[in-house]
Image (cartoon, helix red, strand yellow):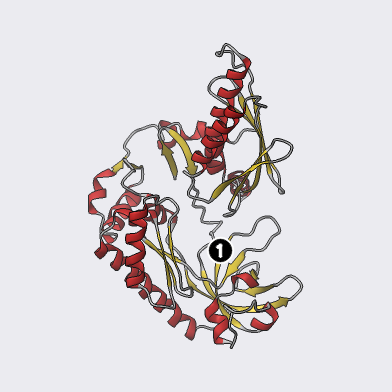
Amino acid sequence: MAIVEDGELIEVHFDVPSRRPLVGNIYKGRVETVLPGMGAAFVNVGEKKALFLSEHEINDALLTARGFEPWKEAVPIQKALRAGDAVTIQVRREGMGKKNPQGTTKISLPGRYWVYLPTEDRVGISRRLGDPEDARRLRQIAYGLKSDTEGLIARTAAFRASEEDLSLDFHSLHDLWDEIAAAAEEASPPHLLHEPLDLVRALVRDRFLDTVSSVIVDDSEHLEEIREFLDQLRLPQFRRRVRFYRGQVPLFVRYDIERRLREALQRKIPLKAGGFLVVDETEALTAIDVNTGSDVRHRTQNSAILNTNLEAVKEIPRILRLRKISGIIIVDLVDMENGDDERKVLALLETELKKDRVPADLIGVTKLGLVEITRRREGESLAATIDDIDAA
């Protein structure tokens, strides 16, 4: 599946049967080892690798049930867990390279409008909801729905949802958790308790918002699946935006997805006015070098430099999203002598980073004049995913 925004390819998602994703899966697992020095444990859930569980990912409900008061003091993992203990755990991050997948006992269940947190007493609002009045309304509704032992995070789609739809979504997620918890009581570890939605339905639930003009599908089974799922979500008005592609040319060729994807994965990425980016991904960080190249449209060198940097900071967040680059990103902009120009460039970069669904933050400029960005890790990069698919 590809997502195109304002004519630009911004995301590509793969569903590969031979590489079943683990993120979101909930298991009843058994603690294999507790490592006090690392503040972590390894939990066997029946997959190829055990889940790495940090002591920071142990929920308060579990600690309270074992006689601790986590709101008063930090509880070392060796006191909270022992080898052989059964625990309900969710995969929060895929394994990368030789690293084990990461798990959490702070369970989260995403719906259309809410993320339901059955073990945490808190309310959160999507960072993409900028209107204080909307945030206040959603907080009031959330506190009216949840108990003191559970939490809710309002998603972007909640912004335009009615109170009835918000309530239905909450109760659906609450009932789902009751089923998972009941299954956990009966199961012997290791045992898979719950798998999230498949790729097609998950993207429809999460990304099919009012701002989406159309979803174009070239498979009749997926077409019907999407329309039926929209009915389940009580969104029949969106059905007319789902279009069946009947062209003879393959869909991704017709919309130029394949070429743009190849270009985006290159080390050297051209900018429109003649400049270019050089992107180097390593395990430790990603380095992006900005060059003016053959930009000769501007009368002065300073204006050419400013234009190149402005183009670069619009393109870099798109590249991060498309290539699923995460962790530490260092950007070497073309040196600017004018402080106002630098502030203008950094302000635009910050604005563009806010469009990312994955938390991406501008940390600042280092003493060496390099721009530092962090982007939350959510699994392998696109290049690594494609390599794995080719190898399979």
* Residue 98 position within the rendered picture, expressed as x and y whole percent measured from the top left: 71, 58
How many residues crowd around disc 1 within 10 Å: few (fewer than 14), some, or many (20 or more)?
many
Residue assigned mark 1: 92
Question: In this rendering, does residue 262 appear at all?
Answer: no
| Mark 1 secondary-structure assignment | strand
Between 311 and 318, the one nearer to me in the picture: 311
Between 302 and 8, the one nearer to me in the picture: 302
* Residue 208 position within the rendered picture, expressed as x and y whole percent measured from the top left: 35, 49
Check the image and name the residue furthest to the front: 339
The amino acid pointed to by label 1 is: Arg
Between 143 and 193, the one nearer to me in the picture: 143
Question: In this rendering, does residue 46 appear at all?
Answer: yes
The residue at 37%/55% (across/down) is: 205
Horizontal side, residue 112 vs residue 98: left or right: left
Horizontal side, residue 202 vs residue 365: left or right: left
Say above or below: 31 vs 314.
below
In the rendered image, the quadrant that contains the N terminus is top left
The residue at 53%/62% (across/down) is: 23
The residue at 33%/72% (across/down) is: 145
* Res 217 quadrant in image: top left
* Residue 322 position within the rendered picture, expressed as x and y whole percent measured from the top left: 53, 41
Say above or below: 301 vs 142.
above
Number of numbered tags placed on the structure image:
1
Check the image and name the residue furthest to the bottom: 67
